[in-house]
Image (cartoon, helix red, strand yellow):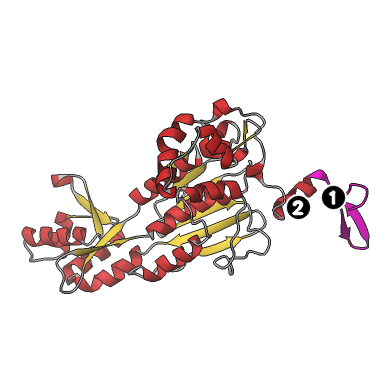
């Protein structure tokens, strides 16, 4: 720097950085943090005090094993969510009545597709708004309700083993990481989650910090928004010691179907993390426990998209309607197919 200006070497000359470049450099080096700044347009009336009293404080007291002394405002000051009688950006995002009023793209957008590629016709599209706790909880619940839980009988055991399509901790941790560590300076983009039949993709605005790469992410601890991270850790939404990635890897190693490890792609502006489904692995494992008639039916559905009871009888000549129904019910129990419709209009599709 020289006379209040910061210069960068370009070839054989020194060029002064613009204010925007200085800001971006400060962000990258962690010298300027979004969540620490006071939200000038907000007031304490924009804080959801009812949420703090009825939902946040009870959990905070349970986790910390001590009663909150003083009023909620003093608690938020101690958490750096209020400064100089004004909410910080962290305070608005964590406890605001309507954070999107101040930060238009501070929400999670989720698109769900039927197949393995993006299609014009989506199965569903949702936007999860509200404070960060609400976004995380509602998005987590939505994804888990729309992913499979597969069951299988274990040798010499009466009880079935339920196997989730994805690691349940991994889903929640990646949603929380996206909400916590995204680049909130960039209000032109938002957290985007895409659900496909074979994977879930988590897109996060903001590249990895300096020194952190997809290869060493499990060894490095970082937080782009340290106040938000600390508050989330206080109520166990994230791991305070930055152990979340290690737990994700550990969950994948212990999963009965050994799913492919998450894939991480990153550049200077975004991070894309992909979780891979275990449904195909489950089908291959369970396939040895289905009979030849059921195999024919699975092949038929793959080719035609569905099968009815009548079609099951047609491709398996000589069997009774009772046998066909038993076979189909067995495939339903094994979570290989799903039934649609009632009585005469009933048909079956791949799960």
Q: Are marks 1 and 2 in contact (CB under 8 Å)?
A: yes
Quadrant into which the C terminus falls: bottom left
Point out residue 38 in the picture as x, y percentages from the top left corner: 66, 36
Give the mark nearest the N terminus, 1 or 2. Answer: 1
Q: Which residue is mark 1?
A: 17
Q: Which residue is mark 2?
A: 25
Q: Does the magenta portion include 9?
A: yes
Which of the 4 quarters of the picture holds residue 84? top right
Mark 2 Cα-neighbour bin, 10 Å: few <14, some 14–19, many ≥20: some
Q: CA distance from mark 1 to mark 2?
A: 10 Å
Q: Nearer the viewer, residue 213 or 287?
A: 213
Looking at the rendering, the stretch of residues picked out in magenta corresponds to: 1-19
User: In the rendered view, does 220 fall on the left or right side of 348?
Assistant: right
Which of the 4 quarters of the picture holds residue 328? bottom left
Q: Nearer the viewer, residue 31 or 341?
A: 31
Q: Is residue 166 visible?
A: yes
Q: Does the magenta portion include 16?
A: yes
Point out residue 185 in the picture as x, y percentages from the top left corner: 66, 44
Residue that appears at 71% across and 54% down: 28
Q: Secondary structure at mark 1?
A: loop
Mark 1 Cα-neighbour bin, 10 Å: few <14, some 14–19, many ≥20: some
Q: Nearer the viewer, residue 159 or 1?
A: 1
Which of the 4 quarters of the picture holds residue 350? bottom left
Point out residue 198 in the picture as x, y percentages from the top left corner: 41, 60
> What label sits on residue 149 in the rendered view?
none
Point out residue 179 in the picture as x, y percentages from the top left corner: 53, 47
């Amino acid at each position: 720097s020289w006379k209040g200006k910061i210069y960068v070497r370009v070839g054989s000359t020194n060029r002064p950085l613009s204010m925007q470049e200085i800001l971006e450099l400060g962000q990258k080096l962690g010298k300027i943090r979004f969540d620490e700044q006071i939200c000038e347009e907000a007031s304490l009336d924009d804080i959801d005090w009812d949420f703090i009293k009825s939902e946040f404080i009870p959990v905070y007291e349970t986790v910390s094993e001590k009663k909150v002394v003083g009023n909620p405002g003093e608690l938020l000051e101690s958490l750096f969510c209020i400064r100089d009688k004004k909410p910080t950006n962290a305070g608005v995002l964590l406890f605001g009545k309507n954070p999107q009023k101040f930060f238009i793209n501070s929400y999670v957008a989720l698109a769900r597709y039927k197949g393995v590629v993006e299609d014009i016709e989506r199965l569903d599209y949702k936007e999860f708004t509200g404070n960060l706790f609400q976004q995380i909880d509602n998005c987590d619940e939505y994804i888990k309700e729309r992913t499979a839980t597969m069951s299988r009988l274990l040798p010499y055991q009466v009880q079935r083993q339920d196997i989730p399509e994805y690691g349940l901790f991994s889903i929640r941790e990646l949603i929380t990481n996206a909400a916590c560590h995204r680049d909130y300076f960039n209000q032109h983009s938002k957290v985007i989650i895409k659900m496909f039949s074979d994977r879930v993709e988590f897109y996060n605005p903001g590249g990895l910090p300096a020194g952190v790469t997809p290869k060493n992410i499990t060894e490095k601890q970082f937080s782009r928004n340290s106040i938000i991270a600390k508050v989330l850790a206080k109520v166990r939404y994230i791991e305070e010691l930055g152990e979340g990635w290690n737990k994700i890897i550990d969950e994948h190693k212990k999963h009965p179907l050994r799913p492919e490890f998450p894939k991480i792609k990153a550049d200077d502006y975004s991070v894309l993390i992909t979780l891979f489904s275990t449904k195909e692995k489950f089908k291959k494992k369970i396939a040895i426990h289905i009979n030849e008639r059921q195999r024919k039916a699975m092949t038929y559905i793959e080719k035609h998209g569905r099968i009815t009871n009548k079609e099951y009888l047609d491709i398996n000549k000589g069997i009774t309607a009772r046998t066909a129904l038993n076979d189909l019910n067995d495939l339903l129990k094994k979570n290989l197919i799903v039934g649609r419709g009632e009585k005469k209009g009933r048909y079956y599709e791949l799960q």
